[in-house]
C-alpha cells in the first residue's frame, strides 16, 4: 500500500450509539459471536455529526477512522487537516468541511415514537441549524422473531389537518395520532424517502441503512412540562408547526415515498442500481453495486461512504488494495484513483454507497 491518505479507502471503526431498545441485528450483521439488544440500536457510519442528548462522551456519534499506520483518529480531525483532498474540490467550494450527509445502520426492536424532522427553512428559523432532516430508509433485514410483521408508519392519511392533529395532541392520544398515518408492511430491498415534515416511525423488527441530512433534530408528539404557559405554548407551536399536513391515499403515499431502484451501470462483472438520485432529493444520493467479478466504482469527484452488505472481496485502486467483507464500513476520499470492486470466493459482493448532494 502506498500513497497519500486521500488516495486510498479508509477503514471506519464500528460504533454503536445509545438511544432506544435494539442493537442485536447490528451485532449479527457484523458477525459478532454475542449479539444483544443493548440499547445501542444505531451505528453512525462515516459521521461528522455529534449525537444530541446527555451522552457521557462528547464525541458520541462521531466516526473514527484507521490510518495506514494503524493509528485511530476522528474523521472530523482528519477532514480539518485535508478538507479539499478528502471531500473533493467542488464539494469543498460549495459546502466547506461539512459532509452534509449522515449514514446509519438502524435496528429497531420496538416501534419508535411517531416523529418528524424540520425542513431546512424551519430548522434555520426555529432550531438555529443550517440543516433540516430529510432522510431515507433502505431495508436490509427483518427480525424473524417479531409478533407482528415489520412495518413503518409513513405519511398522513387523507383529510388530516393541523386542527385534528392538535386536538389529539392536547388529549395525548398517541395511538390516534399514529392512526393518522399510513401503516406500511416492509420487505428487504424496499427504499423509502422520508421528506422533512412528513410524520413517520420505524416499526418493530426493521433493520435498515438510513441516509439523511447531517442533522440530529427530531420532533415528536409528546407534551413536556414547562415552568410557564408561555413556554409550553411556544413548544407546542414549534412542534405542531414542524409537521406538514399534506395527506394522501395509501397508494398515492406509496408512489410518493417508496422509490423503485433503477439500474444505471452494468458490465460483465456486475451492475449498479441507483436507489435514490437527485430527481428524488437534492440532499444525497445512494447506489448499490452487485459484483460477481470485477466492477469499477463510480467516480464523482467527491467523497462517499460505503457499507458492505454481503459477500467478500477487495477494493483495488492505484496504489494498493483493501480487503472488505460483509459489515465493512469505509470512507472513500475524493482523491482515490481508479477504484474497482472485486468479488472473491464465488460470493456476490453487495456494496451500498452514499454520496453528498448533487452528484448522483
Image (cartoon, rainbow, N blue to C red):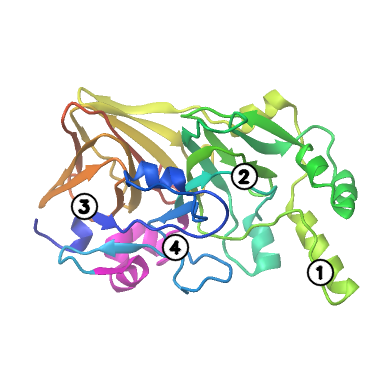
- Residue 95's disc number: 4
The residue beneath circle 2 is 195
Question: Whole-percent x and y of residue 309?
Answer: 34, 38
Q: Earlier in the sequence, mark 2 or mark 4?
A: 4
Mark 3 secondary-structure assignment: loop
Give the extent of the magenta segment. Answer: 72-101
Which numbered disc, 2 or 1, marks the residue closer to the eye?
Answer: 1
Q: Residue at x 56, y 51 (%)?
A: 21
For the residues marked 2 and 1, what is the alpha-carbon distance in whole angstroms? 29 Å
Q: Is residue 218 above or below residue 77?
A: above
Q: Earlier in the sequence, mark 4 or mark 3?
A: 4
* Label 1–label 4 contact, CB within 8 A: no
User: Can residue 111 be seen in this snapshot?
Assistant: yes
For the residues marked 2 and 4, what is the alpha-carbon distance in whole angstroms? 21 Å
User: Can residue 353 be seen in this snapshot?
Assistant: no
Left or right, residue 260 beside residue 342: right
Which quarter of the rendered picture does the C terminus lie within? top left
Mark 2 surroundings: few (<14), some (14-19) or many (≥20) residues within 10 A: many
Give the quadrant of residue 303: bottom left
Amino acid at each position: 500500500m502506498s500513497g497519500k491518505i486521500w488516495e486510498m479507502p479508509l477503514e471506519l471503526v464500528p460504533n454503536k450509539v445509545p438511544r432506544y431498545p435494539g442493537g442485536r441485528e447490528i451485532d449479527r450483521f457484523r458477525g459478532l459471536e454475542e449479539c444483544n439488544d443493548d440499547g445501542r440500536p444505531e451505528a453512525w457510519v462515516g459521521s461528522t455529526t455529534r449525537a444530541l442528548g446527555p451522552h457521557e462522551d462528547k464525541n458520541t456519534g462521531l466516526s473514527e477512522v484507521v490510518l495506514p499506520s494503524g493509528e485511530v483518529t476522528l474523521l472530523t480531525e482528519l477532514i480539518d487537516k485535508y478538507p479539499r483532498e478528502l471531500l473533493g474540490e467542488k464539494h469543498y467550494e460549495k459546502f466547506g468541511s461539512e459532509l452534509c450527509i449522515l449514514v446509519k445502520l438502524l435496528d429497531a426492536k420496538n416501534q419508535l415514537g411517531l416523529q418528524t424532522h424540520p425542513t431546512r427553512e424551519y430548522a434555520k428559523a426555529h432550531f438555529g441549524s443550517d440543516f433540516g432532516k430529510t432522510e431515507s430508509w433502505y431495508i436490509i433485514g427483518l427480525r424473524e422473531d417479531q409478533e407482528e410483521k415489520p412495518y413503518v408508519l409513513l405519511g398522513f392519511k387523507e383529510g388530516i389537518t393541523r386542527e385534528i392533529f392538535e386536538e389529539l395532541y392536547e388529549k395525548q392520544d398517541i395511538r390516534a395520532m399514529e392512526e393518522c398515518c399510513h401503516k406500511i408492511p416492509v420487505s428487504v430491498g424496499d427504499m423509502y424517502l422520508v421528506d422533512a415534515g412528513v410524520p413517520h416511525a420505524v416499526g418493530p423488527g426493521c433493520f435498515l441503512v438510513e441516509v439523511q441530512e447531517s442533522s440530529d433534530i427530531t420532533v415528536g408528539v409528546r407534551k413536556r412540562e414547562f415552568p410557564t404557559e408561555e413556554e409550553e405554548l411556544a413548544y407546542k407551536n414549534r412542534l405542531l408547526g414542524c409537521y406538514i399536513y399534506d395527506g394522501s391515499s395509501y397508494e398515492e403515499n406509496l408512489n410518493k415515498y417508496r422509490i423503485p431502484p433503477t439500474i444505471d451501470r452494468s458490465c460483465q462483472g456486475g451492475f449498479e442500481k441507483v436507489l435514490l438520485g437527485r430527481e428524488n432529493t437534492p440532499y444525497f444520493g445512494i447506489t448499490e453495486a452487485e459484483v460477481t467479478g470485477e466492477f469499477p466504482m463510480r467516480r464523482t469527484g467527491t467523497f462517499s461512504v460505503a457499507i458492505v452488505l454481503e459477500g467478500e472481496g477487495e477494493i483495488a485502486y492505484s496504489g494498493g488494495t483493501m480487503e472488505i467483507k460483509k459489515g465493512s464500513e469505509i470512507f472513500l476520499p475524493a482523491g482515490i484513483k481508479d477504484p474497482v470492486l472485486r468479488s472473491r470466493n464465488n460470493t456476490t459482493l453487495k456494496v451500498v454507497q452514499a454520496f453528498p448532494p448533487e452528484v448522483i
